[in-house]
Image (spheres, helix red, strand yellow):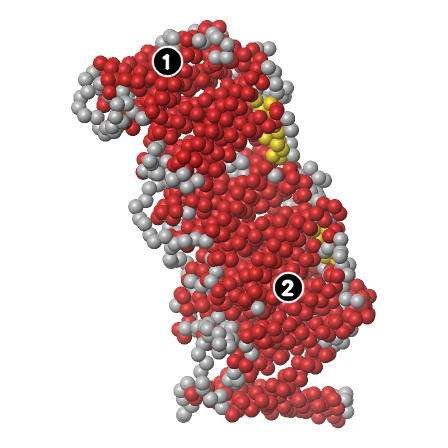
Amino acid sequence: MNESVWLPLLVIASSLIPGVIIFALAERRVKLRTTLNLCGALLKMALVGAMLWGVYHGQHYEVRLALLPQLELVLRADALSLLFVTLSSVLWLVTTVYAIGYLEGSPNRSRFFGFFSLCVTATVGLALAGNLITFLIFYELLTLATYPLIMHRGTEASRRAGKIYLRYTMAGGALLLVAIIWLYTLSGTLEFTPQGFLDGIDEQHHPALIIIFVLLIAGLGVKAALVPLHGWLPEAMVAPAPVSALLHAVAVVKAGAFGIIRVVYDVFGVDFATLLGVTGPLVIVAAITIVYGSLRALFQDDLKRRLAYSTVSQVAYITLGVAIAGPIAAVGGMVHLVHQGLMKITLFFCAGNLAETLGIHKVSEMNGVGRRMPWTMAAFTVGVFGMIGAPPVAGFISKWYLGMGALEMDQGWLILVLAASSLLNAAYFLPILYAAWFCEPSGPWPEERNFGRKETAWALLLPPVVTALLALAVGLLALAPFTPLAWVEFVVQREFVP
Amino acid sequence: MVPSSEIPWGALLILLPLAAAILCFVWPKLAVVTGVVTMLLLTLAVGGFAWQLQREGLYQHAVGGWETPLGIGLYGDGLSLLMLAMTVLVGLAITLYARSYFNQKQARVFWPLWLLLLAALNALFLSADIFNLYITLEMVGLAAVALVALKGGRDALNGAMRYLLATLLGSLTYLLGVALLYHSYGTVDLVLLAERIDNSPVVWAALGLMGAGLLLKTALFPLHFWLPAAHASAPAPISALLSALLVKASFYIFLRLWLVLFAPLGGDVALLLGLLGAVAILWGSWQALRQTRLKLLVAYSTVAQIGYLFVAFPLAAAAGAMLWNGVSYLMLSHALAKAAMFLAAGNLLLFGGHDRIAELDRAVQRLPISTAAFALAGVSIMGVPPSGGFIGKWLLLEAAIEQGYWLLAAVMVVGGLLASAYIFKVVGYAFTRSTATPEPQSIPMGMEWAALLLAIASILLGFTAPWVFALLGIGDPFGGGAP
Amino acid sequence: MSASDYLSVALLITGAVFFLAGTVGLLRFPDLYTRLHALTKADNVGLGLMIAGLALQAESWAVVGKLLLIWGLVLLAGAGVAHLIASGALKQGVRPWKK
Amino acid sequence: MEKVTLLIMLFDLLLGLGLLWLAWQLLESRNLFKAVVLFVAFGLLMALAWVRLDAPDVALAEAAIGAGLTGALLMAALAKLPSRDKSEPLADEKGHWLLRLALLLVAAGLGYVVHSLPESAPGLSAEIANNLASSGVNNPVTAVLLNFRGYDTLLELMVLMLALLGVWSLGIERSTREEPVGPVLTTLVQFLTPLLILVAAYLLWAGADAPGGAFQAGAVLAAAMVLLLLAGWPLQGLLTGVALRLMLVAGPATFVALAGLTLLDAQLLAYPPQHAGKLILLLEVAATLSIAVTLAALFLGYRPRTNKEPG
Amino acid sequence: MNTALLYSLVGIGLFSLGLYALIVHAHLLRKILAINVMGSGVFLLLIALAKRTATPLPDAVPHAMVITGIVVTVAATALALTLMVRVAMENHRAELSDQSQE
């Protein structure tokens, strides 16, 4: 066994093993649990760093385990998977710190952190998946691992949310399963291949392939919250804030979006997908989702629900970038995977802080909150500007590339969509900023907790500030080496441009 | 010292539990020790048998030195081995569980019955003689009935009676078929029958009779009417046993007969079986979803899961050995998962004093190990990866889609979704807050771990398929050569 | 046919007549006790005649012995069981039939 | 084939119709007691049918077990049912014409199949005849039961044991009525018991060469014990505990032991030909004992306990 | 029409009659009787067919099978009857009950 085999396995194990141990820990072993969590997260980051270095220098990481006589579980680190793996492992560390602070003193923490670790394991696994069946396995594992997190609070509302979440995701998983098996019966392989593995298939199967594409996108679109499959996402807001942060920024919606990238680029291949004529409709679905999500967000008073609809809209950018089927747009879409993650996680951390510290859940309660919690709201502001796409925050980069990409492919009308979306983003986010910074508090906070001179606990404050800074940094330094943008361009060069 | 390769493992698998049962019967004080030791020895014997099969291929033994057709032939191939291994795996867990479950008075009856049942199952899986199979079937049936009724109680007694009538009817119908086949072909040996069989009215009649009898015992829709009552009302380890092993035993015979005797006869029959299987999946899952009692839910889930085994029949002609591999795998993983579920359900029932699903929350939260067992087993039942159930369903779906049986494929997928609905209906309670605090009952560790280990095994099966398929190919039970 | 054959036939037919009479009695008599009476007549006498008829045809004395043993056993069982049934019925309060 | 004269034909026809008629009567009778009595009669007619079919071994088994013991079991069970259960109106049968039609079709189909069977089938008579000499006995049925297919018989003894275990776990001990049995029954039993034992011994001994054998002998012996139990002999008090259990397992245990010993020679249940006769006799003696005690215990219906044992 | 065929047809008749009664009647004793009648039918068929050999002697294998079958049936009947008595005590009548209770 050499490094190229054990490194991917270790990356998986670094969250799986702590997770399993944490399940078995008694509730009161707080220190041990925290240590395990943080060590796992740090170790994973270190391992991923090593792997990044290796892949950049042409090292090939691959593990295979036979599942069925002709089908294997394949873990492979290519440049694209590393993009997602890195995002996951960095944000996992941050979210873990946040969750430790957020859940302090609440019950069932062993269960929570156990599933939390499983969730990250699943995310990393599907990022590293080297074929569709491996992807499917981790995709379903992700469903199973996030369900308990959504249900964590144990209230009637969370039961309802869990039920709805399951309905959507299990159905999505079933569609994916059928599509994958069908594909397998036609192609005889499921291995992710740059430019896809389907162009050799007999023309008579093309209609079937179109259906398969639709099924795949539908299965993945559930998690990616493409309209009309987004219904579970706003409901899932009842979960604790770190969970929402994780779901929205890293794990679930990104798994869907990442899957769409894989399907379009590594299963069908851009050219073949264009030939089949399936990318055009996908662009339209993505565009509709972008506008629809923003419109719905406008009318939400509940802060987390507003953020949720914003996610619906923002994640569709990734799909859009992929579906436009040009290299520049691809860069925009893929880099948004990272950028949206950083920005959205910041926003959710902040929303969690408001709820945890002041009991604020609604936009209408946020008057003057900027003065009470300046650091939190500063981070929030960075996130908001990113979302709107204002330079120099990361969101601007994504939108720029998307727009350029659309023009490149003669899809100029998409500029209008992007512009409309930005306007809507501004419309639903700026009033929040205005209220927070420029209005007087309208009364006492709903449920204030006292943290002495600090505005809130350290573990709650640091994560949003860090992610906000990161979001700012990747925007400012976009052209430096090893930024997400640079890496995405590296990905696109290596894999998509013939 | 006999070299271990010459130890007659096959025969020992039958004789050992028989001798142990006699010992337990005569000296009840030794019952628990004998039971546990025998179970361990059986595990060893299955290991030895597997090793022997792998080295020497097909196992054939003429009992009494009389060659067939006069004598009785023992016959072991990969499929038999799989069934034996399944029996031992589930058996280990049940033994561990039962050690703490029964009181002294019940244990006195349980252990000899359980050992006789093990002997009967092993004998059944190693027999290639259709009359001998009748006797083993009766042994299995009567032992099971006695076990269902072991703890008494109205539901259990009613369930046992219903089961007894069904199983006797099934065996008699089967025997009538045996009579016809014997008269026509002058042998009751499966290998010889396979050589001699032709397409005549007798074969059709025998297929109808033996098939009906066995399907009744397997509880294929619409012959499942007896199953929910019996499986739900029995003591927990017995429920596990019934759902995990017993329906599989009669299915195994049916599959054998189908493979060697009847498959050439009927595409239409196969299609009928497939349709019945499909209806079973939908009906069973739907009923499971409607139940308000946990054990009934699990029992109806068995009705549905049996359906999956039959969906394969219309696909088999074109799909070949790999499909049967999938069916066998589904059988194995269902056995482990369902046993785990029933054992876990038994713990919840024991702890809470009831099994009303809507009031389970407290019990579910106090017994995390049992709940985890239930959930993990549920994953395999749903056919969600990674699990043994996923591998089995993948192969079935692959065949269905490849051959364009869209209806069957759709039913399988819908069945999986319904399964997730009824399983999460239960698992959901693990996360809700509850106010009631009944006096906690303590559940022995062994009983919780028996369930969990089985469930984990059913998940791990998701990674062992190629290895199991290689063993399954010994003796080429499904025809068409090794994969 | 020899004389013994004729005798056999005669004995068998007479025996059959007794059985017939017993059967008619079983069906037609008014109560349990009288029916038992009819039945035992058929058993004892009818069977006796039949045994005698068959014994004439026997090939060896051993067979004759076996036949007689059958008769004896049936007599014993018939009488015993009839007694048990009758006394059981009396105990349960079944009244004998009176005209 | 025997010559089928008209008279014999007529007899067969009558017997066959009689069997069907009795079956119908017993299944449809309103009175359950009557049904059970008719069942015993049915069993006896069945025994007659076996004789007609040249199956004296089966006839003996049927008469002793099928009619005799099953009848006793049915009677005993009937006595334990709540009294109003014993003659209940039959189910409403208006809706059953479809079922009747279906079953009629099934029966007709099966009849057709049987009719289509070859007039004379291969069977295994030739194989049995060829191997009878080395089987250790001369009665082919005994040879099949205890040698050629002895493995079946081993498992079958286990079925008996299983049933007994079930009955013991379910059966409830009844307070025995201390009614005087009367001199007639006592005398009858005193006379019959030794005779039955004698008959059993004869059947066992004869089984090697002529109809008879362990099952028939065991059943007759069981009948003797049932009679004793009916006559109020406290067998259940005399035979308890380990002694009883040892007797119950004598047959299976001997069989299993023999199977284990033969396994040392790597051939399950293969008797050395020179000892086959003796081994079979040994097996039969043990099996007779076990069968007899098991059947009687099944009739008793609950587990007899020593005084020391708690209930 | 010969003896063997006649009796095999009777056997089939008994089997069907028993099956009918088993399905139709609710009383458990009737069901148990029905099973026994069905069994007799099967055994009759086995033995009757055994007579149809080329040799003058009937085939002994089915005879042995039927003896085995008779013993199995009596064992099953004993168990069924005991169970019936218990069920009758619980249900207050010797019929199966459909409703379950705690």
Residue D299 location in percent, x, y?
Answer: 54, 75
Task: Tell me if residue C9 comes above or below residue A137 in the rendering.
Answer: below
Seen from the viewer's position, the closer of residues D70 and C24 is: D70
Residue A460 location in percent, x, y?
Answer: 34, 25
- In which image quadrant can residue A167 be found? top left
Residue E68 location in percent, x, y?
Answer: 65, 67
Residue A74 location in percent, x, y?
Answer: 59, 28
Task: Look at 39% across and 68% down and name the residue there.
Answer: E92
Task: Tell me if residue B182 comes above or below residue A463 in the rendering.
Answer: below
Seen from the viewer's position, the closer of residues D307 and B247 is: D307
CB-based contact (under 8 Å), mark 2 and mark 1: no
User: Quick one: SS at disc 1?
Assistant: helix
Residue annotated with mark 1: A386
User: Quick one: SS at disc 2?
Assistant: helix
Judged left or right of residue D268, residue D47 is left
Answer yes or no: are tags 2 and 1 on the same subunit: no
Q: Which mark is residue D127?
A: none
Q: Chain of mark 2?
A: B
Question: For the N terminus of chain B, which image quadrant?
Answer: bottom right
Judged left or right of residue B411, residue D5 is right
Q: Is residue B197 visible?
A: no
Q: Chain of mark 1?
A: A
Task: Tell me if residue A36 comes above or below residue A495 in the rendering.
Answer: below
Task: Look at 65% across and 60% down and name the residue there.
Answer: B16
Seen from the viewer's position, the closer of residues D248 and B309 is: D248
Task: Mark 1: give few (<14), some (14-19) or many (20+) Cα within 10 Å.
Answer: many
* Amino acid at pointer 1: Gly
Task: Mark 2: give few (<14), some (14-19) or many (20+) Cα within 10 Å.
Answer: many
Measured Cα–Cα span from mark 2 to mark 1: 77 Å
Q: Is residue A329 visible?
A: yes
Question: For the C terminus of chain B, which image quadrant?
Answer: top right
Residue annotated with mark 2: B19
